């Protein structure tokens, strides 16, 4: 397992307005998938704009260990020469995924569908996260779990059959990771693998599988058409291709909310992916009265992207429906921060999945709000934040529990609260947004170690 790094406390202090332009790093979900499909295809995949955060670098290392030739050509520019479906080799060592839930779970799908044996491990956060949700469908597809830590956690060892068994699987949680693991295992199944989800989750795996040459059909499913039935024709020949990674909306969320809550701010965030299964935060902030303009909408790498012009705004509390959760699942910590500045209550419904993220994010957000004097309550799986339409007190030290998004969200709070906010450890920010500190400082944000 990766050894815990020395904690790096950081403090954000209120100060001047934020001004300027930035481009957030490449999307984490797409970056992981580019590495994985590069591994599973024949020929060369070239990636532009890859997120070079620790999570994705772990996936790159795992792809290498499973047989791919992975090379960094320049900043964000990578080349992967894959081995094709069925061409993987047994990794010589444990695949250490560090903090990366997505990388590890998607790669479990790959390994569970192939005749290779691999051991997965990670840091204390990953070791605490549930993997049964992935192992259960993979077992139905023929994968054997040769060893696992108590409760179906890493470290665990997985082995797939020569060919996976095609299944139809209804996901028990709205999780793109579960869907993706099943589809990736289904690549080596003779026949159609189908995943049914009651609520549509991010569709990057489906889109990228098509880009690499697989046949994937997607139909609306269930009441109101909120769900999806996704079917993959097994054993395609995947061909390496070019992947352009758009900027990550989940990283854009931090400077975006920082600009909204810091008086006098005006910030332009460039090239942000506008996939509607990822833009729930923007929808919510617009309902709260945020001044966010989408300009220069265009296509990049098969996704619509836009520049977001964001100005400081007076926000009003709203109710965020549970159905929106999959489209903003990683953005609730920073939405809770925005809600702390809004006038009136913001109710965020249906947050049970937050309990199994890099930390128990529902508990971590509540604790962070509490130490900074923000009135809030948890009601079942819902979080209610009582904004006063003015900066909250701040002044607290937030426990981040190895969770990058908890660290960034509360640093954003500190940029506009009445007193500085400290997070106990900012080291994990490097998993998803390695340039967060210089980026925020360049806008005028006062964040120091
Ligand atoms: C991701 C899916 C989400 C999200 C994670 C990235 C993905 O997790 O929280 O950061 O790339 O598929 P779940 O599938 O557990 O909701």
Image (cartoon, helix red, strand yellow):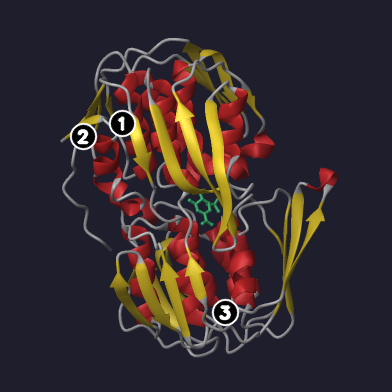
Dot 2 or dot 3, earlier in sequence: 2
Q: Position of residue 445 (x, y in %)?
A: 27, 30
- Distance from disc 3 to disc 1, alpha carbons, whole Å, reads 41 Å
- Distance from disc 2 to disc 3, alpha carbons, whole Å, reads 42 Å
Write down the quadrant of residue 31 in the picture.
bottom left
Asked if ligand 1 lies within 8 A of label 3, the reply is: no
Q: Circle 3 is placed at which residue position? A: 113
Up the image or down, 59 lies above or below 446; here it is below
| Tag nearer the camera, 3 or 1 | 1
* Labels 2 & 1 near each other (Cβ < 8 A): yes
Which quarter of the image is occupied by the N terminus? bottom left
Q: Circle 1 is placed at which residue position? A: 411
Q: Position of residue 149 (x, y in %)?
A: 40, 62
Q: In the depicted view, which residue is nearer to us: 90 or 337?
A: 337
Q: Position of residue 214 (x, y in %)?
A: 66, 78
Residue at point 46% right, 79% down?
A: 45
Q: Circle 2 is placed at which residue position? A: 10
């Amino acid at each position: 397992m990766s050894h815990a790094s020395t904690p790096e406390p950081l403090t954000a202090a209120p100060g001047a307005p934020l001004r300027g332009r930035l481009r957030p790093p490449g999307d984490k979900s797409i970056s992981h998938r580019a590495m994985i499909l590069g591994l599973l295809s024949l020929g060369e995949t070239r990636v532009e704009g890859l997120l070079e955060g620790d999570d994705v670098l772990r996936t790159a290392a795992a792809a290498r260990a499973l047989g791919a030739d992975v090379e960094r050509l320049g900043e964000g520019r990578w080349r992967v020469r894959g081995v094709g479906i069925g061409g993987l080799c047994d990794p010589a060592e444990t695949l250490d995924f560090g903090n990366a839930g997505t990388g590890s779970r998607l790669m479990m799908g790959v390994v569970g569908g192939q005749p290779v044996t691999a051991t997965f491990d990670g840091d204390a956060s990953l070791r605490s996260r549930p993997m049964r949700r992935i192992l259960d469908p993979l077992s139905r597809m023929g994968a054997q779990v040769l060893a696992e830590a108590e409760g179906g956690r890493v470290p665990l060892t997985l082995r797939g059959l020569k060919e996976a068994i095609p299944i139809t699987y209804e996901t028990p949680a709205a999780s793109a990771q579960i869907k993706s693991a099943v589809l990736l295992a289904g690549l080596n199944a003779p026949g159609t693998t189908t995943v049914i989800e009651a609520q549509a989750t991010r569709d990057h795996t489906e889109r990228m599988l098509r880009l690499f040459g697989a046949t994937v059909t997607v139909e609306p499913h269930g009441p109101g058409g909120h769900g999806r039935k996704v079917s993959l024709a097994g054993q395609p020949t995947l061909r390496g291709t070019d992947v352009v990674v758009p900027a990550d909306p989940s990283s854009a969320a931090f400077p975006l909310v920082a600009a909204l809550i810091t008086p006098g701010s005006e910030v332009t965030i460039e090239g942000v992916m506008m996939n509607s299964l990822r833009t729930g935060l923007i929808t919510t902030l617009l309902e709260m009265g945020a001044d966010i303009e989408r300009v220069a909408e265009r296509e990049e790498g098969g996704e619509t992207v836009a520049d977001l012009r964001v100005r400081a705004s007076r926000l009003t509390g709203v109710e965020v429906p549970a159905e929106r959760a999959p489209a903003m699942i990683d953005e609730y910590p920073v939405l809770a921060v925005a809600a702390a500045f809004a006038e009136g209550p913001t109710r965020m419904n249906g947050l049970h999945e937050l309990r199994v993220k890099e930390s128990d994010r529902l508990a971590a957000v509540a604790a962070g709000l509490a130490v900074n004097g923000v009135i809030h309550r948890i009601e079942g799986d819902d979080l209610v934040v009582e904004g006063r339409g003015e900066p909250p007190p701040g002044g607290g030290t937030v426990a981040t529990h190895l969770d990058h998004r908890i660290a960034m969200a509360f640093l954003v709070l500190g940029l506009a609260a009445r007193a500085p906010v400290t997070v106990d450890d900012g080291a994990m920010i490097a998993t998803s947004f390695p340039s967060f500190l210089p980026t925020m400082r360049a806008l005028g944000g006062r964040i120091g170690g």
